[in-house]
Amino acid sequence: EVRLVESGGGLVQPGGSLRLTCRASGFDFSSTIMYWLRQAPGKGLEWVSVSTRYGATRYAESVEGRFSASRDNAKSTHYLQLDNLKIEDTAMYYCGTTEDGRNRGPGTQVTVSS
């Protein structure tokens, strides 16, 4: 059974940082492309980043230069470092194995507010 569990969200002021963690199990993580996705209140699911099995990563334009994804294949864990957070980054953040979010965890809430 594919299982993805995100953690690390919270309340942070604009300009602050958070590190999200996604623990995966039930599939061959080291061979799987991994995504970070987010959904802001009242909006649709948005692609944030995609990481290949080797760690090469692409980012959405809205987060380029501020967010950094990484993975530890030995630990089946996917990370997202969020720096210089903006109010518009407020959203539920998910990790997933598909870009459309069909296979994703329950999410972790990130709230950016002064």
Image (cartoon, grey):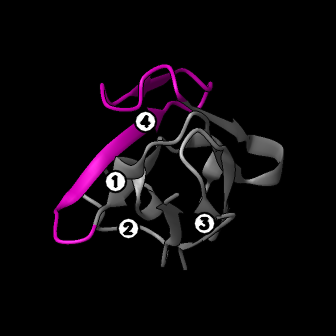
Q: What element does badge 3 sit on? A: strand
Alpha carbon separation for disc pair 2 and 4: 14 Å
Disc 1 marks which amino acid? Thr
Counting from the top left corner in percent of width and height, residue 69 is at: 59, 35
The answer to whether the residue labelled 2 contacts the one labelled 4, judged by CB atoms less than 8 Å apart, is: no
- What are the residue bounds of the magenta stretch? 41-66
Kindly identify the amino acid type of the residue bearing the numbered disc 4: Val
Q: Position of residue 95 (x, y in %)?
A: 49, 58
User: In the image, is 32 to the left or to the right of 19?
Assistant: left
Mark 1 vs 4, N-terminal side: 4
Q: CA distance from mark 2 to mark 3?
A: 26 Å
2 or 3: tag closer to the N-terminus: 3
Which label is found at residue 12?
none
Label 2 with label 1: CB-CB less than 8 Å: yes
Residue for badge 4: 50
CA–CA distance in space, label 3 to label 4: 24 Å
Question: Which residue has dot 1 on it?
Answer: 98
Q: Residue beneath label 3, please?
A: 11
Q: CA distance from mark 3 to mark 1?
A: 27 Å
Q: Crowding near pointer 3: few (<14 within 10 Å), some, many (20+)?
A: some
Residue at image location 16% in from the left, 62% down from the top? 44
Establish if 2 lies above or below 50: below
Check the image and report above or below for 103 versus 1: above
Compare marks 3 and 1 and give the one earlier in the sequence. 3
Residue that protrudes farthest toward the right in the picture = 74
- In the rendered view, does 84 fall on the left or right side of 104? right
